């Protein structure tokens, strides 16, 4: 198991970033043995072999000659481009400056950036990002190479926290401006805002790109502990609320509301055509990432993309 980093400013220091890079490299390379598997299978553009059509396949990939010859609908697989461009929309709103387990949500979001970079920058692939911190947005140009990816990670990790919440929908829309050739888009956020404010942007993005949504979750956002009166601070507004956690009915309503919220997020992402990976601050997030990539590899061998 990987030990989490203490939720202090030191977690974003050069020493900790170096340790994070080492953990990502050893864990991912150690568990993802064999041929290199990308973060998402990706449709690519180079023609490959044909296979029988299954429900949900893109009809634009129909292999009409094989279909006519066999009288059974076939689609043509495509081989992913060797040089892809991956863009990350990273939401570092104040709600991510929270954590009750092994990681702050913000630190786990930065760790996810490290893992995405490790999985995507091989072979000359380019990696860029748009980062939202409160009311401001920064764009980091896409560049190839592991050294550039590490530089981007250091820059992102050192960004100061700011009050307020970034508009996740507007942040995601920036990945479509300017229009780019087909590639991979990764959205990293806690998705705490109303899905109606960002689901359309994700759907628009998935029309052209393969989209992965990485949801960052802390266990206290799913259920409350029985610890008596608990002072809760809204990191985005600074408002303080006192909650009587010894009330079992309140804890039950909280858990039910949290479950409904997470279900709505999952449904919105699924409906928008995005792959969905949930990382928790109290779990072995790298193992969760490895399992996700392995599932994507399995899906690719079966001819599917989700």
Image (tube, grey):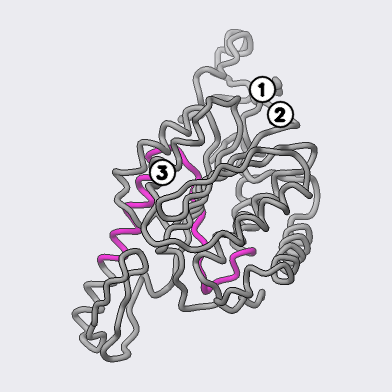
Name the residue tied to disc 1.
Answer: 45
SS for dot 2: loop
Under tag 1, what secondary structure?
loop
Q: What is the C-alpha distance between the residues marked 1 and 3?
A: 24 Å
Callout 1 touching callout 3 (CB < 8 Å): no
Instruction: Judge whether residue 98 can be spotted in this image.
Output: yes
When the figure is inspected, residue 269 is found, relative to residue 290, above or below; the finding is above
* Residue for point 25% across, 79% down: 251
Task: Give the mark nearer the N terminus: 1 vs 3.
Answer: 1
- For image coordinates 75% across by 66% down, the residue present is 18
Pick the quarter of the image with the N terminus: bottom right
Counting from the top left corner in percent of width and height, residue 13 is at 67, 69
Is 195 magenta? The answer is: no
Circle 3/circle 2 CB separation < 8 Å: no
> Circles 1 and 2: CB distance less than 8 Å?
yes
Vertical placement of residue 291 versus 23, above or below:
above
Q: Is residue 264 magenta?
A: yes
- Residue 121 versus residue 162: which sits nearer the camera? 162
x, y (%) of residue 72?
55, 17
Say whether disc 3 or disc 2 marks the residue closer to the N-terminus. Answer: 2
- Residue range highlighted in magenta: 257-286
Which residue is located at x 48 percent, y 61 percent? 216
Q: Which residue is denoted by mark 2 in the rendering?
A: 81
Structural crowding at the residue carrying mark 2, measured as other residues with C-alpha within 10 Å and reported as few (<14), some (14–19) or many (≥20): some
What is the x, y in percent for residue 87? 59, 40
In this view, 288 is above or below 293: below
Crowding at mark 1 (Cα within 10 Å: few <14, some 14-19, many 20+) = few
Furthest toward the bottom, the residue is 228
Residue 284, quarter of picture: bottom right
The answer to whether 198 appears left or right of 242 in the picture is right
Q: Distance between the residues labelled 1 and 2?
A: 6 Å
Residue 270, numbered label = 3
């Amino acid at each position: 198991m990987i030990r989490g980093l203490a939720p202090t400013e030191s977690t974003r220091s050069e020493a900790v970033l170096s340790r994070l890079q080492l953990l990502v490299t050893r864990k991912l390379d150690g568990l993802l043995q064999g041929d290199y598997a990308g973060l998402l299978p990706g449709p690519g553009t180079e023609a490959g072999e044909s296979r029988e059509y299954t429900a949900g396949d893109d009809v634009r990939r129909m292999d009409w000659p094989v279909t006519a010859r066999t009288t059974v609908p076939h689609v043509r697989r495509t081989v992913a481009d060797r040089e892809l461009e991956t863009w990350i929309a990273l939401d570092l709103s104040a709600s991510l400056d929270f954590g009750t387990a092994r990681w702050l949500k913000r630190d786990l979001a930065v760790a996810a950036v490290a893992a995405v970079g490790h999985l995507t920058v091989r072979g000359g692939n380019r990696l860029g990002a748009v980062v939202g911190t409160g009311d401001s947005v920064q764009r980091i140009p896409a560049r190839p190479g592991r050294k550039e990816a590490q530089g981007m990670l250091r820059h992102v990790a050192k960004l100061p926290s700011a009050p307020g919440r970034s508009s996740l929908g507007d942040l995601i829309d920036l990945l479509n401006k300017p229009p780019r050739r087909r590639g991979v888009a990764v959205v990293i956020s806690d998705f705490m805002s109303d899905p109606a404010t960002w689901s359309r942007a994700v759907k628009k993005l998935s029309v052209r790109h393969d989209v992965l949504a990485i949801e960052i979750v802390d266990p206290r956002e799913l259920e409350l502990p029985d610890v008596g009166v608990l002072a809760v601070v809204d990191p985005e507004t600074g408002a303080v609320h006192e909650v009587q956690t010894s009330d079992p009915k309140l804890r039950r309503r909280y858990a039910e509301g949290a479950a409904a919220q997470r279900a709505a997020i999952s449904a919105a992402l699924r409906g928008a055509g995005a792959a969905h990976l949930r990382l928790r601050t109290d779990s072995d997030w790298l193992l969760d990432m490895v399992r996700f990539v392995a599932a994507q590899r399995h899906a690719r061998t079966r001819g599917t993309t989700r």
